[in-house]
Image (tube, helix red, strand yellow):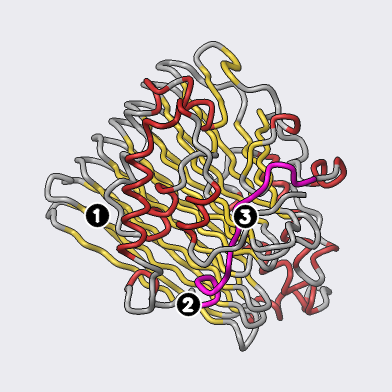
């Protein structure tokens, strides 16, 4: 199996490994600008307020290589990564590279629904890609987003025409393998939902058994036109040596409804950014998330909700369950522009600490420049309620099962906001597998 020569900076890895076909050359100025911006910004340090509680020294010291095209994934492993009962169009990426032979057919799957690897869309549908790609990330102050801009090539492209409801979700399955060396990949997603259209996309990160150190630096842009409905899932189940940065950007038109669901279960260090801009009047955005850590996992979540139009509603509901020596971070920021009168925004972050060594840093932030608004925020951190445990024990349950029931109930509230029942069922099974004593539970979701 061929490998790339290790280098000391990620931009150098990108440059050394890149073989850009002529049909993609129109993107080179955008890539070059991203590379320059990353070099200007450098790795975020603790003086960067957005990264105050997340130490990137280990990541910055790692010599990454670019992925190869022939990494192997067994049929058994691929089958184990499916979501049982989910009828979806499957696109498989291995170490960041699209694998056509493992994926479903792509192209115009049904009238008005176009699903392609981004590499093909850049070449075949420049007229659709160029007006959108990078619109929400070009002026970034985030080094990882700049790095993704620099490496735009692999990823997924979804476009739904006006008035069309995609009949199936799109399942983007990203598999990390044991490459023998630390591998970096920079997947890009571009989702364009036309006027009065609807689509559901699941981004799903997993790892084969024994997968080593890797970096996934992903960015996804969603453009939801007037009255569109978009539901986006990010399910992170990486290996325990993985670094993962996932950034979701969304632009909402008039009367749109965009839902973001995030579940962080794996990884060594995970950063999850969700940044919607409510740009059209009377639009609505749900940001729903759960992060579950143990051992020495570090799970960092940053929400930036920008209300830029009148009469919009946003809801942030994030929960953390932390055990061992794990660390959680939640930064929730709501910005309300002067024109965004009659904004209705809610932000809630609740954390459950299961051990003395677990920690969480929660930072709710409001920036309100309008006077006719309704904005609330709240963060709570605590332990399993001993009175509730006592109540269940008085009904005949042992302490372990009682605690498992309460922890599961805490997590399950977020599942209920998800429209895809197979995903809800998968997450319920994951939680039951993680919790001592939960195997006795019989759960329907």
**Number of residues whose C-alpha sits closer than 10 Å to that of mark 2, classed few (under 14), some (14–19) or many (20 or more):** some
Q: Are marks 1 and 2 in contact (CB under 8 Å)?
A: no
How many other residues sit within 10 Å of disc 1, few (<14), some (14-19) or many (≥20)? few
Residue with the mark numbered 3? 236
Q: Quadrant of residue 50?
A: bottom left
Residue that numbered label 2 is attached to: 55
Circle 1: element type: strand
| SS category of the residue bearing label 3 | strand
Give, as a single range, the part of the protein colored magenta: 57-72
Q: Earlier in the sequence, mark 2 or mark 3?
A: 2
Mark positioned earlier in the residue sequence (1 or 3)? 3
> Of residues 318 and 23, which is closer to you in this image?
23
Closer to the camera: disc 1 or disc 2? 2
Residue sitting farthest toward the top = 111
Front one among 108 and 60:
60
Q: Look at the image and tell me whether residue 252 can be seen.
A: yes
Q: Which residue is mark 1?
A: 374
Q: Is residue 413 visible in this depiction of the protein?
A: no
> Is tag 1's residue or tag 2's residue first in the polypeptide sequence?
2
């Amino acid at each position: 199996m061929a490998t790339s020569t290790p280098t000391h900076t990620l931009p150098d890895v990108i440059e050394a490994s890149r073989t850009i076909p002529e049909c993609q050359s129109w993107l080179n100025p955008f890539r070059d600008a991203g590379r320059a911006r990353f070099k200007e910004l450098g790795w975020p340090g603790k003086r960067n307020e957005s990264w105050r509680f997340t130490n990137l020294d280990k990541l910055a010291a790692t010599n990454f290589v670019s992925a190869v095209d022939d990494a192997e994934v067994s049929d058994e492993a691929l089958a184990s990564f499916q979501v049982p009962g989910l009828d979806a169009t499957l696109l498989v990426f291995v170490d960041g590279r699209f694998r056509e032979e493992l994926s479903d057919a792509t192209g115009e799957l049904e009238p008005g629904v176009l699903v392609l690897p981004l590499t093909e869309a850049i070449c075949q549908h420049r007229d659709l890609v160029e007006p959108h790609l990078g619109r929400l990330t070009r002026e970034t102050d985030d080094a990882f987003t700049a790095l993704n801009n620099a490496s735009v090539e692999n990823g997924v492209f979804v476009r739904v025409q006006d008035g069309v409801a995609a009949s199936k979700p799109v399942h983007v399955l990203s598999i990390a393998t044991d490459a023998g060396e630390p591998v970096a990949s920079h997947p890009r997603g571009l989702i364009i939902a036309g006027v009065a259209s609807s689509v559901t996309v699941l981004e799903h990160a997993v790892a084969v058994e024994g997968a080593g150190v890797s970096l996934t630096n992903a960015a996804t842009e969603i453009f939801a036109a007037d009255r569109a409905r978009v539901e986006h899932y990010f399910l992170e189940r990486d290996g325990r040596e993985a670094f993962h940065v996932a950034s979701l950007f969304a632009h909402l038109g008039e009367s749109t409804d965009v839902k973001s669901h995030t579940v962080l279960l794996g990884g060594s260090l995970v950063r999850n950014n969700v940044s919607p801009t409510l740009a059209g009047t009377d639009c609505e955005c749900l940001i729903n998330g759960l992060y579950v850590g143990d051992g020495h996992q570090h799970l960092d979540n940053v929400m930036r909700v920008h209300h830029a139009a009148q009469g919009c509603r946003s809801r942030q509901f994030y929960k953390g369950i932390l055990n061992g020596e794990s660390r959680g971070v939640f930064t929730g920021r709501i910005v309300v522009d002067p024109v965004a009168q009659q904004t209705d925004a809610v932000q809630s972050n609740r954390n459950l600490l299961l051990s003395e060594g677990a920690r969480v840093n929660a930072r709710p932030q409001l920036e309100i420049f309008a006077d006719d608004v309704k904005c609330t925020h709240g963060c709570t951190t605590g332990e399993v309620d001993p009175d509730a445990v006592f109540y269940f024990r008085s009904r005949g349950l042992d302490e372990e099962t009682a605690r498992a029931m309460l922890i599961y109930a805490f997590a399950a509230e977020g599942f209920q906001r998800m429209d895809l029942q197979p995903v809800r069922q998968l997450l319920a099974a994951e939680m039951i597998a993680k919790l001592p004593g939960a195997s006795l539970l019989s759960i329907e979701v």
